[in-house]
Amino acid sequence: AHQWRGVIREYADRLPVTESTRVITLGEGGTPLVFAPALSKLTGSEVYLKVEGMNPTGSFKDRGMTMAITAAVEAGAQAVVCASTGNTSASAAAYATQAGIKCAVLVPDGKISMGKLSQAIAHGAELLQVNGNFDNCLEVARKLSENYPVFLVNSVNPARIEGQKTGAFEVVDFLGDAPDYHLLPVGNAGNITAYWKGYKEYAAPYASSTAGELPAVATKTPIMWGFQAAGAAPLVAGHPITEPDTIATAIRIGNPASWDQAIAARDESGGLIDAVTDEEILAAHRWLSAKEGVFVEPASASGVAGLLKYHARGLVPAGKRIVITVTGHGLKDPQWALRNEDGTDVQPTKVDFDVVAVASALGLA
Ligand code: F0G
């Protein structure tokens, strides 16, 4: 059976590597495209989830990080830096460890989940909690990389976008063509930029550096629908948000670095970027866990929140193929599953070690 070799080796023809490149990989990519029965039934369309929580560090960031760390090592880097709401730092720390180089991460003070924080610590990153939000962290990380011998591995690094575009390749390879719609969460806007680049590349002949001209793989590109959290929706407002706020801490970002590229993806694809409230995000998070069997972190549910919102307004057409990227694993930030819809804590039912007591608690006796 074929063992997946990570996105760089699988898509070497379309990535900035050569035969002598030392590939830094943890086997990322090749994530499941899961048919979503409940969302499909609701909408009358064929809805699939691209489950990016199945990557080695539990989020889609690994696709970009394998490429960014590989490129940094090729350029002679001894150290990398990133700003992060948590997932990028977890990923950078893991890949830098495999490469044998140093990693520094700047995270907003107190607003990142325990799971993500513990990953950066476990992989031995220099972890600095900055007295500020993600946008402040990114500004400092950029200046650090401009003035000191450290490479920036945020998605403003083009290698990150190159790696992340493989998400679109996998969708097309699996479905046989591009879907009609692609929905995803939007924070710093690297991922919407990367998916759109990947879809465009697959729909046109491609001048590969190693294999000559490759024919088009897809006959079309999808309509891109991006969703930000309502308290952190600068692309919807049309201006930066100085104090972004949402329970979806992964996308608590007020001034996305890939702003122009996100708008281009929206407009070129005939799509939209809209906002979903924290309540809508948590309802979608519950829907995914309870109806599809897919456990994600809250931010990851915002694409699904968008689908549910647009469906309720009668704006989701039936008979289409819809792919939604769910970006990170539920175990990254599990506390939200332990909360009831009314905000109270879930209390486990306690029973004695007795079969009749257990049967009666289960309503069987
Ligand atoms: N979903 C998750 C789980 C994320 O961690 C992020 C971004 C996004 C969606 C948004 O993706 O920024 O490409 O638009 N997390 C970054 C981080 C900012 O630092 O981990 P985007």
Image: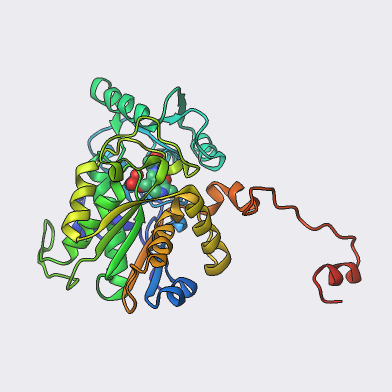
- Residue 327, placed above or below residue 178: above
Residue 107 versus residue 208: which sits nearer the camera? 107
Q: Is residue 145 left or right of residue 206?
A: right
Q: Position of residue 350 (x, y in %)?
A: 83, 57
Residue depicted at 29% across the width and 66% down the height: 181
Residue depicted at 89% across the width and 70% down the height: 355
Residue 38 versus residue 22: which sits nearer the camera? 38
Q: Position of residue 186 (x, y in %)?
A: 34, 48
Residue depicted at 53% across the width and 47% down the height: 332
Q: Position of residue 179 (x, y in %)?
A: 28, 70
Q: Residue furthest top?
A: 147
Q: Residue furthest front?
A: 313
Residue 237 versus residue 354: which sits nearer the camera? 237
Residue depicted at 34% across the width and 77% down the height: 318
Residue 250 can be seen, yes or no: yes
Q: Is residue 145 left or right of residue 339?
A: left
Image quarter (top left, top right, bottom left or bottom right) of the N terminus: bottom left
Q: Quadrant of ligand 1?
A: top left
Q: Position of residue 277 (x, y in %)?
A: 45, 49
- Residue 2, placed above or below residue 9: below
Q: Is residue 26 left or right of residue 266?
A: right
**Quadrant in the picture for residue 210:** bottom left
Image quarter (top left, top right, bottom left or bottom right) of the C terminus: bottom right
Q: Is residue 163 left or right of residue 3?
A: left
